[in-house]
Amino acid sequence: MQVQAIGNIDEPSFIIKGQSEVYKSKAIERLKKVFHWHEPLEGVSRHFRESDLREIFEEHRGTAIVLDFDYYSCLVKCIIHQQLNLSFAHTLTERFVKTFGFQMEGAWFYPTPETTAQLQIEQLRAIQFSGRKAEYVIGLSEQIIQGHLNLDIMEKLSDQEVMDTLIKIRGIGRWTAENFLLFGLGRPNLFPKADIGIQNALKILYGLPQKPTQEEMESYSVKWAPYLSYASLYLWRSIEKRSEKK
């Protein structure tokens, strides 16, 4: 499917093109979820107009949560991004996809779990994965193909059930699970307090001498529920240019 935006923030409009009539309805439904077309942003914006984040929401008005293409690629990307600056995380992800993934009609796709499970740690280290990160990505893929982890049922589980399921997998902690809930499943009320980007954004927003504590972040975020995921997204956006320069 090809998606072209032809509208604007106030009147969004898109042209969708594709060649397969067989999967047309299913593909359009997936696109709606990926781009959050089913989630009007006016209610979210209204919620933050009287909050400490109002200026950030005005500056980045119209920014929606865009999901990853599928659950597996989202989890792999989250593992790759662990404890890396944004620039190198993107570089490493691109290397992984273009070295071991596949291309279809000009678009690159992550390798399948079956392909990744067959990789050797040395192959990933050759593109600058750490040994531990290589073990995590391969191990996750093995868990999937062996039937120990079923990503297809995640959509039906509660946030806590997803968390409890994922953190049993080696290499997946709370930060990774929360990012999967946000960018894989599109859950609306996620606020990864361990995320360095969010901590830095709050430090700048409130003029703090150092990064906020977990307790301070909890206090700041109380009034942002039930749209904590959007608070997270807009805080990330508020320091995007700073992150790109590093």
Image (spheres, rainbow, N blue to C red):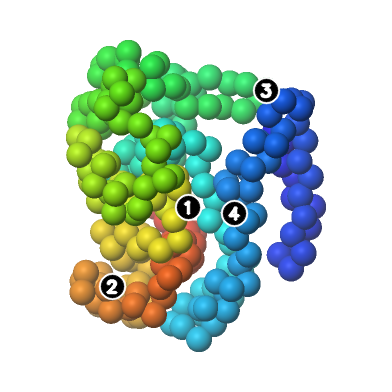
Q: Quick check: 141 above or below 70?
A: above
Q: From mark 1 to mark 2, how far is it between C-alphas? A: 22 Å
Foreground disc of the pair 1, 2: 1
On the image, numbered disc 2 is attached to which residue? 217
Amino acid type, callout 4:
His
Task: State the separation of the CA atoms marked 2 and 3.
Answer: 44 Å
Q: Mark 4, mark 2: which one is toward the viewer?
A: 4
Which residue is located at x 76 percent, y 41 percent?
A: 16
The quarter of the displayed image where residue 204 is located: bottom left
For badge 1, the amino acid type reads Gly
Above or below, 49 against 193 in this view is: below
Secondary structure of the residue carrying numbered label 1: loop
Precedes in sequence: disc 2 or disc 3:
3
At x 58% / y 21%, what residue is drawn? Answer: 103
**Residue with the mark numbered 4:** 36
Q: Residue furthest bottom?
A: 50
Which residue is at the front of the view, 122 or 17? 17
Q: Marks 1 and 4: in contact by CB < 8 Å?
A: yes
Measured Cα–Cα span from mark 3 to mark 1? 27 Å
Percent coordinates x, y for residue 6 in the rendering: 79, 52
Instruction: Identify the residue under disc 3.
Output: 105
Residue 186 image label: 1
57 or 92: which is nearer to us?
Answer: 57
Q: Earlier in the sequence, mark 4 or mark 2?
A: 4
Between discs 4 and 3, the one toward the N terminus: 4
Front position in the image: 239 or 227: 227
The picture quadrant where one finds residue 191 is: bottom left
